[in-house]
Amino acid sequence: MTEDHYPEWAQTICSWKYLWVVELALLLAIIILIITACRFYFQMKEAERFLKEDEEAGSDAAKQARKNKTERTKAGNEAGKSERQRR
């Protein structure tokens, strides 16, 4: 059975006593990046939802304003007809 021979630099890194500190720091950095990316993603989704609700509310308000204007116009026309009929 043959032994695996690793390059000297790999053996040096693996024998370094503070390797676990570097691995832990890298793991922590990855976790922080993932959390930051998730927060950014969900903040964007919330902003999109807010804008969509705002647009819908705006379009509802515009529809209501058009409806009110139409009703006022109809009421004005009815009043005009009754006034003309009285003459």
Image (cartoon, helix red, strand yellow):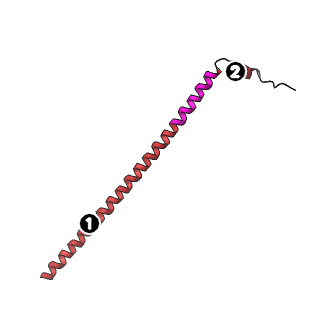
Name the image quarter holding the C terminus.
Answer: bottom left
Q: Residue at x 57, y 32 (%)?
A: 30
Residue behind mark 1: 69
Residue behind mark 2: 13
- Quadrant of the image occupied by residue 31: top right
Q: Position of residue 50 (x, y in %)?
A: 40, 49
- Quadrant of the image occupied by residue 72: bottom left
Report the front residue among 42 and 51: 42
Which amino acid, by three-letter code, is at mark 2? Ile
Mark 1 Cα shell of 10 Å, populated few (<14), some (14-19), many (≥20): few
Q: Where are the magenta residues, as a range?
A: 20-35
- Identify the secondary structure beneath mark 1: helix
- Identify the secondary structure beneath mark 2: helix
> Is residue 80 depicted above or below 14 in this figure?
below
> Is residue 10 depicted above or below 76 in this figure?
above
Relative to residue 30, is residue 39 drawn left or right?
left
Mark 2 Cα shell of 10 Å, populated few (<14), some (14-19), many (≥20): few
Q: Position of residue 26 (x, y in %)?
A: 59, 28
Relative to residue 13, is residue 86 drawn left or right?
left
Q: CA distance from mark 1 to mark 2?
A: 79 Å
- Labels 1 and 2: the sequence-earlier one: 2
Name the image quarter holding the N terminus.
Answer: top right
Q: Is residue 87 magenta?
A: no
* Mark seen at residue 39: none
